[in-house]
Image (spheres, grey):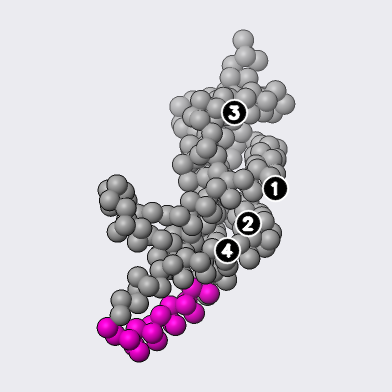
Amino acid sequence: MDALQSFVAVYVLAMLRYLPVFVLAPLTPLRWAPPLVRIVLVMLLAWMTAQWATPLAVNGIAAWMSAICGELLIGLAFGLAVMLPHAALHTAGWVIDVQAGSSAGVLFDPGSQSDTQAVFGNALMWLATVLFFVLDLHLQLYRMLAVSVQLVPLGRSGAHLAWDGLAALLGNSFLLGLAVVMPVMFGLLLVDVGVAYATRSMPQANVYFLALPLKLLVAIGLLMATLPLFPALFARLYRDAFQRVPGLLGG
């Protein structure tokens, strides 16, 4: 009976450690997986962890509360390491949409019901989701979760969130996210300068709407030209986030 209780305790705590990684899925590449698939994956990973993890005996409500909070905090750190890079790419795509003028498509689409059209943002999200699995970054995430159980045993973490580590993860993720689309942003800036000069020269013409097709073509062309560099920058973005997980936990 003691062995069964220890197995269940390890299983529950392992689920709590892995759960935030999949709960934060709406802003990660895992959001394309149905909720049932994510739940089954968490249960499977927890069951595999309970097979080889050190038996655990947690006594008392206070000890259980401390263990639960510690596991959720570790899982939150890994969840942020997956969520923030994807959020940074989403923001970078939104900036391109604003610069290129594709977000103004709501003016020409009566059926959009005032919803902002994120053409380049959605394209970046789809490409990032594909690369996340093609580059085996999901396997690296699972390996890090498994190694975390060895380095920080279940129920004995005592972890705390380091705010300076969170600030470093947040700032570096968005900096690298903007670096991915920086050539496109710089090219569109040059187009905006030319449009501003044309507006100054021909104030009677509505240069904004005349320049929209040009800006869209420039954005598409620059994005296609920088696609060969995208996998390396994307891998660097996520691997840098993974390396900052110990600092996020005060390690």
Q: Would you name the residue on which mark 4 appears?
A: 223
Q: Amino acid at mark 1?
A: Leu
Q: Amino acid at mark 3?
A: Leu
| Marks 1 & 3, CB-CB < 8 Å contact | no
Element marked by disc 2: helix
Element marked by disc 3: helix
- Measure the C-alpha gap from mark 1 to mark 3: 20 Å
Q: In this figure, what is the number of numbered marks?
A: 4
Q: Nearer the viewer, mark 1 or mark 4?
A: 4
| Marks 1 & 2, CB-CB < 8 Å contact | yes
Task: Name the foreground residue: 41 vs 135.
Answer: 135
Q: Would you name the residue on which mark 1 appears?
A: 135
- Measure the C-alpha gap from mark 2 to mark 3: 25 Å
Q: Earlier in the sequence, mark 2 or mark 3?
A: 3
Task: In the displayed orientation, state which residue is furthest to the right.
Answer: 52
Element marked by disc 1: loop
Q: Amino acid at mark 2?
A: Phe
Which mark identifies residue 41? 3
Q: Amino acid at mark 4?
A: Leu
Q: Position of residue 166 (x, y in %)?
A: 51, 57
Residue at image point 35% right, 54% down: 116
Residue at image point 38% right, 54% down: 117
Left or right, 26 with reference to 134: left
Q: Position of residue 27 (x, y in %)?
A: 48, 46
